[in-house]
Amino acid sequence: MFDCYQHVYREQDAGNNLPVFSPDGSHLAFIKWRNTADGDIWLADPDGRNATQLTANPAMESMPSWLPGGDRLAFLTDRTGHREVWSIPANGGPETPLRDVDPDLEYARLSPDGTRLAFHLRKGGMMNVWVAPVGPDQPKQLTFDRELMGFPCLVAAKRPHRLRAVGIERQRVGHGPGTGEPLTAVRPRRRSARL
């Protein structure tokens, strides 16, 4: 039996992460980090074989997302001096800008229909979830937490798209023994919103 983990994830000179299957499940896109370079987008068979490098820019490329039809990938890059969303054909070819949302853009994911981006930004020191159409309209802030809310994804459903996000919630649980310092517990928190 072929071990995808062995072929995609165990290279000595690289760290590979954020894998995402194509809409039809025939390919796996992932980020390959090398000791001597920033991340690039790679493509492999679902079992990890036949890995092929798609991007080769000296800048960082990350966060691959498939566009509908599985013939193109969207990804985050900082090749212009700040992070933007670009796209590339899945079989290789010219990379083109898709959307410049905000200079502080982080962790962007494309909706299953390819019309929206879900991402988090740190505005005022707090990370919150935002969405923006792939077109020129303005981004819309969806969460207004004072702690942390990020790592969004848009999920397909029979109902309109729903947004899922993960955050943290702090809760005072008492005082430290002998010090009187407040103790805080941190636990994961999930949010869901209809768009």
Image (spheres, rainbow, N blue to C red):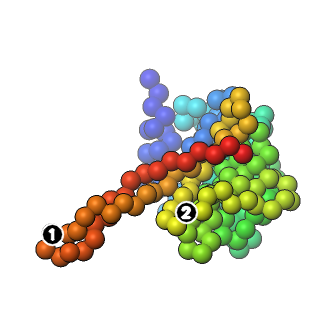
Quadrant of image for the C terminus: top right
Q: What residue type is labelled 2?
A: Asp
Q: Taking 137 as reference, is 126 left or right?
A: left
- Name the element at disc 2: loop
Quadrant of image for the N terminus: top left
Q: Residue at x 13, y 74 (%)?
A: 178
**Residue lying farthest to the right in this orientation:** 136
Q: Residue at x 64, y 46 (%)?
A: 193
**Hey, which quadrant is residue 76 in on the image?**
bottom right
Q: Taking 11 as reference, is 45 left or right?
A: right
Q: Where is residue 113 in the image (x, y as percent from the top left)?
A: 77, 39
Q: Position of residue 91 (x, y in %)?
A: 76, 41
Q: Judge whether 83 appears above or below 89 on screen.
A: below
Residue 63 visible (yes or no): yes
**Frontmost residue, 176 versus 82:** 176
* Disc 1: which residue: 177
* Disc 2: which residue: 145
Q: Which amino acid does label 1 sit on?
A: Pro
